[in-house]
């Protein structure tokens, strides 16, 4: 009996995905056949980057990011300072995006914005601005989930870039998230594994802080790791059930290791920085790849895409690339400019919502915890 119920449920899910595809293709065909130019102005303000982009039919015309330097001196993002900086940056950034794209405000088809997840104060700036602009220009408003956008960055129209086919697995790794997502269609996504504590970006940044490196330390660990020995020091790998991750124990292990070693030799970090960074990166990449392998095995899906700030990391990019040869996966690695936070990814998500005519009304609010 239970087998029959499960077969029936599976059938219903497949039917649902198929219907979604048919509706999507129907609208997409209408728009594409009509030769209409769909210009999306996209705004991203979820954390400490104020970004705006203009996309025409999924192709980038401009992609501007203003990174907030103010947080460096505090060793991490200060939410109140982030929202104030967004207020200062948002007008010039959007202006620059429009000038670079060489389009007039009257040619904008819709405004897409990041609704969440992220810092509430930061999200409020982008959300309020997008609403006002949409109201003023009398064009549709499109809300976008930041984590979905990191995944959909793979659908930006680019020459010589193969897009993933549905279904595929996405490993989204950033300063706030670590997830394995099963992507059945543009907006049909299911998180099948995630961190139960720290995000992988935090593991990089906190380890870097322990080593005395400035914020954000992830890119610096990557830089030093390239010249070090990844097997010089051994860090423990957490044992977490299923497809979930945990990084808080790893961070503590790095802290105790550094405290112990610097007690014996105060210059230990200076003498071994490259090897420590290489060993940290090697362990983190190993943790990510182990779970990804498990996810491929369990789902039978071997198309894998990575996204989010940490997907800029050379170690994870290489491990993913190598898996094509080693295990026959088909892998998708984003261009560097689409890894860390940017508005182009919000624009491509907005474009596909536009094709589905999925618009928001003005009662929409920012959501700091916004699930995929
Ligand atoms: O996606 P993102 O720009 O912002 C969030 O949504 O969190 O990700 C930022 C994170 C930071 O933790 C940063 O240290 C990390 O991405 N990151 C890196 C690298 N580039 C950025 N981590 C390791 N290696 C890198 N090359
Ligand atoms: Zn992000």
Image (cartoon, helix red, strand yellow):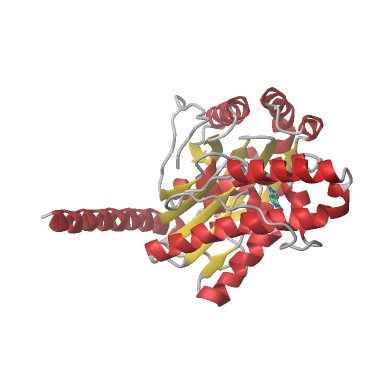
Residue 335 drawn above or below residue 202 = below
Residue 49, picture quadrant: top right
Question: Residue at point 59% right, 43% down?
Answer: 249
- Residue 312: percent from the left, percent from the top? 68, 55
Quadrant (top left, top right, bottom left, bottom right) of the N terminus:
bottom left
Image position of 23 (left or right of 186): left
Image position of 371 (left or right of 222): left
- Residue 348: percent from the left, percent from the top? 55, 50
Residue 202 or 350: which is nearer the viewer? Answer: 202
Question: Residue at point 55% right, 75% down?
Answer: 326
Image position of 63 (left or right of 365): right
- Residue 344: percent from the left, percent from the top? 62, 48
Residue 158 drawn above or below residue 121 = below
- Residue 250: percent from the left, percent from the top? 62, 46
Quadrant (top left, top right, bottom left, bottom right) of the C terminus:
top left
Residue 61 or 190: which is nearer the viewer? Answer: 190
Image position of 138 (left or right of 252): left
Question: Residue at point 67% right, 40% down?
Answer: 51
The answer, for residue 102, to whether it is visible in the render is no
Q: Work out which residue is located at the far front of the displayed protein and give it.
A: 264
Residue 196 drawn above or below residue 154 = above
Residue 14, picture quadrant: bottom left
Q: Work out which residue is located at the far left of the displayed protein and give it.
A: 1
Count of residue discs: 0
The answer, for residue 255, to whether it is visible in the render is yes
Question: Residue at point 50% right, 71% down?
Answer: 329
Residue 161 or 209: which is nearer the viewer? Answer: 209
């Amino acid at each position: 009996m239970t087998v029959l119920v499960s077969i029936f449920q599976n059938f219903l899910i497949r039917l649902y995905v198929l219907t979604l595809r048919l509706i999507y293709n129907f609208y997409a065909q209408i728009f594409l056949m009509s030769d209409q130019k769909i210009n999306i102005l996209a705004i991203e303000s979820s954390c400490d980057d104020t970004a705006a982009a203009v996309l025409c039919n999924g192709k980038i015309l401009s992609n501007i990011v203003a990174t907030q330097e103010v947080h460096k001196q505090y060793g991490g993002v200060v939410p109140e300072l982030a929202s104030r900086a967004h207020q200062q940056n948002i007008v010039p950034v959007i202006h620059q995006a429009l000038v670079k794209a060489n389009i007039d405000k009257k040619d904008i088809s819709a405004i897409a914005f990041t609704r969440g997840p992220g810092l509430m104060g930061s999200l409020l700036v982008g959300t309020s601005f997008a609403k006002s602009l949409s109201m003023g220009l009398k064009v549709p408003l499109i809300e976008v989930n930041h984590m979905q956008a990191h995944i959909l960055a793979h659908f930006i129209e680019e020459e010589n870039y193969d897009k993933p086919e549905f279904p595929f697995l996405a490993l989204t790794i950033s300063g706030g998230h670590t997830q394995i997502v099963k992507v059945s269609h543009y907006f049909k996504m299911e998180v099948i594994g995630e961190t139960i504590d720290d995000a992988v970006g935090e593991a990089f940044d906190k380890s870097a802080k322990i080593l005395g490196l400035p914020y954000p330390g992830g890119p610096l660990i990557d830089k030093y790791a390239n010249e070090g020995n990844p097997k010089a020091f051994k860090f423990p790998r957490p044992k977490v059930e299923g497809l979930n991750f945990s990084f808080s124990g790893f961070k503590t292990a790095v802290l105790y290791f550094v405290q112990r070693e610097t007690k014996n030799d105060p210059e230990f970090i200076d003498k071994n920085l490259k090897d420590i960074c290489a060993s940290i990166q090697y362990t983190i990449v190993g943790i990510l790849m182990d779970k990804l392998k498990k996810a491929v095995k369990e789902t039978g899906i071997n198309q894998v895409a990575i996204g989010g700030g940490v997907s800029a990391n050379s170690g994870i990019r290489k491990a993913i690339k190598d898996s094509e040869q080693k295990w026959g996966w088909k892998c998708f690695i984003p261009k560097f400019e689409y890894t860390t936070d940017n508005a182009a990814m919000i624009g491509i998500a907005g474009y596909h919502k536009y094709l589905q005519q999925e618009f928001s009304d003005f009662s929409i609010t920012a959501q700091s915890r916004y699930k995929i």
